[in-house]
Image (cartoon, coloured by chain):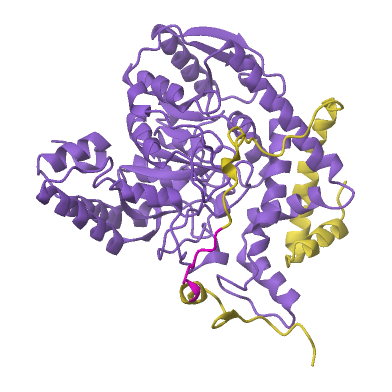
Chain colours: A purple, B yellow
Amino acid sequence: MSAPATWTIPEVRAALDARKISARELVKDFYARIEKQNPQFNIFLALSPERAYAQADKIDAAIAAGDALPALAGVPVAIKDVISTHGIPTTCGSLILKGYRPPYDATAVERLERAGAVILGKTNCDEFAMGSSNENSAYGPVRNPLAPDHVPGGSSGGSAAAVAAGLAVASLGTDTGGSIRQPGSFCGVPALNPSYGRVSRYGLIAYASSLDRIGPFAHTSRDVAAIMSVIAGRDPRDSTSASVPVPDYAAHIGKPLHGLRIGIPDDYFGEGIDPEVRKKVEAGIALLEKLGCKRVSIRMPNTDYAIAAYYIIATAEASSNLARYDGVRYGPRVPGSTLIEMYQKTRGRGFGAEVKRRIVLGTYVLSAGYYDAYYLKGQKVRTLIARDFRDAFQKVDAIVTPTSPVPAFRFGERTANPLQMYLADIYTVTGSLAGVPGISVPCGKTSAGLPIGLQIYGPAFGEERVLQMAHAFEQA
Amino acid sequence: MKISREDVLKVAALANLELSDAEVDSYRGHLDDILTYIDKLNEVDTSNVEPLAQVVAAAEDDSALREDVVVRADIISEVLQGAPDPEAPYFRVPRVIEK
């Protein structure tokens, strides 16, 4: 039998059913490996053993009693540090929330636990989910488990790395402009950014509210589907969560792809793409054709404007959302002689460089005299980008692209120029602006052994299709 | 440069952010790069395009609105535990009004 580090959700269940291991022993196994590997990879910011063992004991009691087990019984999972967990430190990778313990659970966490999953702890990320490399965490970057001198991607780098390193069976991340898909691609694990509104964001600490989403990482697309079945669906506590019925994702896994039309946007294969990434993604598209998909060339003419629109909208929303960190209700306070001075010092020292940069940019684009030129213009261009997707999905069932134009890079290689770092988000921000689901699946490695991701976009609330395609692709 | 030091300082004041001189200089340069890049949006004709504030694909029915019901939370002590300067049941801040 294989080691728990590589177990998928069905393998966890099989081991529990066969009494090869108890839920408690399984948790112990994961914590032992976390303890050993975390000093090197810096994946976890906080562990929650008390809560994990209590949950494991509940599962073991159910097994002993012969009760029917819930869908994720005993499955050890990791949660990105921007998602609230009752009583477990939740810092968003920031000093400004150091020591903060939320008084409640996010709905996604509550649903995972209700389905039997075991919360191991919180994963490191770029501060307030702002970044593409994890180098913006106040607690030091995560190292890529496949290449420790390389970044794991960001912002959900810890959640991607936790699965890649075998330190969690699955994990939750968040995606605003690519923060699930890009680290999934850099760490070589499937990673789904669901449709906007598909998963409740109650308890998600906001970065850019019109873009933020919660989604899973796992070893297989089948496991991603299993997590989605648990966390998706309307939540009365999040008015932006959709009442669209949740399909049986598992039922779509294993369906043949015959006759599906896949759109390949010419606009996504222009300059800036790494030749090895292009080659592997082209090979991936050829493989999908072999599986019965029909390749259709499409145009998405507003792609070139996506980054500019995204960084206006995301930073504007961030500048507003992050106004709440003022040293009054949570986190450390830096004293000042007046209230305003206390705010300024607390925020000036509590936030890191990238967060401050985005607050400055976001405040600028919203400020008097610039609102129409930047924010309103950005929202209008967003309409055009959403229209590109809508028009494309008239002709095709899915859109296939690279997840990132480059594979994982070395620490410090891209920090000097923030704009260059932003430009690499091109293939993911488009779908973020349009609200559609996108999955990144591993599609081979570079000659240096770095994973490459292929992205499959589906129409809004078409997660079952991207999961079906991702699964078939993995199996081929 | 499109952006002056004063612009950065003005925005930082609006955002209640204390910035060091080095930060002001560095953000000024970054902001200038990014805003210059963003100018490419002026190539796009948006004269007949409505702005898209949020992709609310699903809230077309009334379910986004719920009854406003008061629910007791009883979490004051837990909330105050995380506060830098609590005085139950309040958060204390530096004096705002002079005697």
- Residue A10: % across, % down: 23, 34
Q: Is residue B83 left or right of residue B41?
A: left
- Residue A40: % across, % down: 36, 53
Which residue lies most toward the bottom here? B99
Q: Main secondary structure of the magenta part?
A: loop
Please name the residue shown 33% across and 31% down the image.
A220
- Residue A228: % across, % down: 40, 36
Indicate the quadrant where residue A306 lies: top right
> Between residues A413 and A396, which one lies in front from this camera angle?
A396
> Between residues A10 and A245, which one lies in front from this camera angle?
A245
Let me know if residue B75 is in the magenta part.
Answer: yes
Above or below for B36 versus A453: below
Q: Quadrant of the N terminus of chain A?
A: top left
Query: Would residue A303 be seen by someone viewing this image from the given angle?
Result: no
- The stretch of residues the image draws in magenta is B69-76
Q: Quadrant of the C terminus of chain A?
A: top left
Please name the residue shown 28% across and 57% down the image.
A52
Query: Would residue A387 be seen by someone viewing this image from the given angle?
Result: yes
Which residue lies most toward the right here? A369
- Residue B83: % across, % down: 54, 75
Let me know if residue B95 is in the magenta part.
Answer: no
Please name the residue shown 85% across and 31% down the image.
B42
Above or below for A222 versus A362: above
Q: Is residue A402 left or right of residue B34?
A: left
Q: Is residue B11 left or right of residue A160?
A: right
